Image: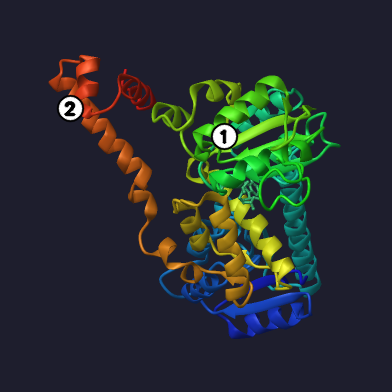
Amino acid sequence: MNEIPFRILIVDDEPNICSGLAMGLAGDRFVIATASDASEACALFRRTPYHLVITDLRMPGPSSGLDLIRDIKHESPETLILVVTAHGTLETAVEAMRLGAHDYIAKPVDLPMLRLQVAKAMEHHRLREENRRLRDRLASAGEFPEMIGHSATIHEVFTRIRQVADTDLPILIQGESGTGKELIAQAIHSLSGRRQGPFVAANVGALPESLIESELFGYEKGAFSGANRQKPGWFEMAQGGTLFLDEVGEMALKTQVDLLRVLEQHELRRLGGEALIPLDIRLVTATHREIDELVAEGKLREDLYYRLKVVTLRVPSLRERREDIPPLVTHFLHRACARQHRESKQVAGAAMRMLCDYSWPGNVRQLRNCMDVLAVTVEGPTIHARDLPPELCSTPSREIPTLEESLREAERAAILTALARCNNHRERTARLLGISIRTLQYKMSRLSLH
Ligand SMILES: Nc1ncnc2c1ncn2[C@@H]1O[C@H](COP(=O)(O)OP(=O)(O)OP(=O)(O)O)[C@@H](O)[C@H]1O
Ligand SMILES: [Mg+2]
């Protein structure tokens, strides 16, 4: 994969100085552009950010070099700025440093000295990048090499995984689609004493009821028409390891009874079989629904619910941990470019702000897919706001509540109105709303209405 070349922007109102400096630095390690005033420099910079800006301070036009430093630091805080100062303007140089310039060089510019300063800036940039990569790796403390996340919220999840991984307690993972539930189940497995055993992931929501039992429990030859040979089920395939059942909330009630029996007795019979097969598995389950709601609606048996939820792990949606968006963007973009044999890309400041503001209803999976597309559709080294898919551009989505937020607000209003009308009498309120008292209590606690 090609590394991004070091990009330098030289700003000076004297064309001779600009071209002199550019020629003095020319070489295949750099991409160099020049601008003759602050507004031209800003326009260039917005099109493609630069790693280093070398700028004069006194320039014609409405904005000075100091304004330029302020604008650049706002757009791209990581860009390094080297100011060129005339003799006797030390005070302005100090002001420039205060605004974020990292160093200055006196006029007339001594070219070997400038080359040295640029080499130093490059090294600074390289170390910072390396540092960031190391920090990203360390943030997951080596235990979660696949999982990116800086936010306090995701770190709480990591802590919880660490606490429970090396036990045999069943774990129920709850989180919206694409939040990383399967990845977490894998992390639990690889941190557990069962890591040498198999990790079997199965989506029980995706199969029709008629198939699910034979897949879960396996069958003997001749158990039903079409059973031409004996086949072990997911439970047996996970012997000695971890069985991850996704979308448990979608399972038929009859299957839930059978599943519960197997979990209680730690043994199973294959369909059409006699022998009891002892089981040694750790069960991790997941659902994208609110699990208490599934029980309240009668979709999940209460006895199974208590069996599954011994430990519950809630995975926050991506919009609840927006600090994780920039590192995830960088990670997936880097990976997608490498896989597609494309030049590495960076994301311009405005584009990153839009990515951070978007509500990501499909969570990390949607963000990953978005980066996969951008890696191939964007030519050149920088992703700009205009390159982003329309749903990210049309409206700042943070101002629009998500469907879930709107529904929750509507639910809250309906419950409050009904409670007021029934003088806070819970049973009458539930009847008025057409729900059970249990559902009402559950919803009130979820909406903090007590
Ligand atoms: N913290 C993370 N760091 C890196 N990649 C992540 C992270 N979280 C999720 N992913 C990636 O996002 C994608 C979706 O994750 P996963 O399949 O685990 O989600 P899920 O919650 O099981 O989704 P669903 O509910 O649709 O089954 C995967 O490619 C996964 O590797
Ligand atoms: Mg999943």
Residue at 48% from the left image edge and 30% from the top image edge: 300
| Quarter of the figure with residue 87 | bottom right
Front residue of 116 and 355: 355
Of the residues tagged 2 and 1, which is closer to the observer? 1
- Mark 2 residue's CB less than 8 Å from ligand 1: no
In the rendering, at what x and y percent does residue 2 appear?
76, 72
Q: Which residue is mark 2?
A: 417
Kind of residue at disc 2: Thr
Front residue of 313 and 230: 230
Q: Residues within 10 Å of mark 2 (few under 14, many from 20)?
A: some
Along the horizontal axis of the image, is 26 left or right of 104?
right
Along the horizontal axis of the image, is 295 left or right of 89?
left
Kind of residue at disc 1: Thr
| Relative to 371, residue 269 above or below | above
The structure's colour scheme is rainbow
Along the horizontal axis of the image, is 95 left or right of 158?
left
In the rendering, at what x and y percent does residue 80 appear?
65, 60
Residue at 74% from the left image edge and 22% from the top image edge: 167
Q: Quadrant of the N terminus?
A: bottom right
Element assignment for label 1: helix
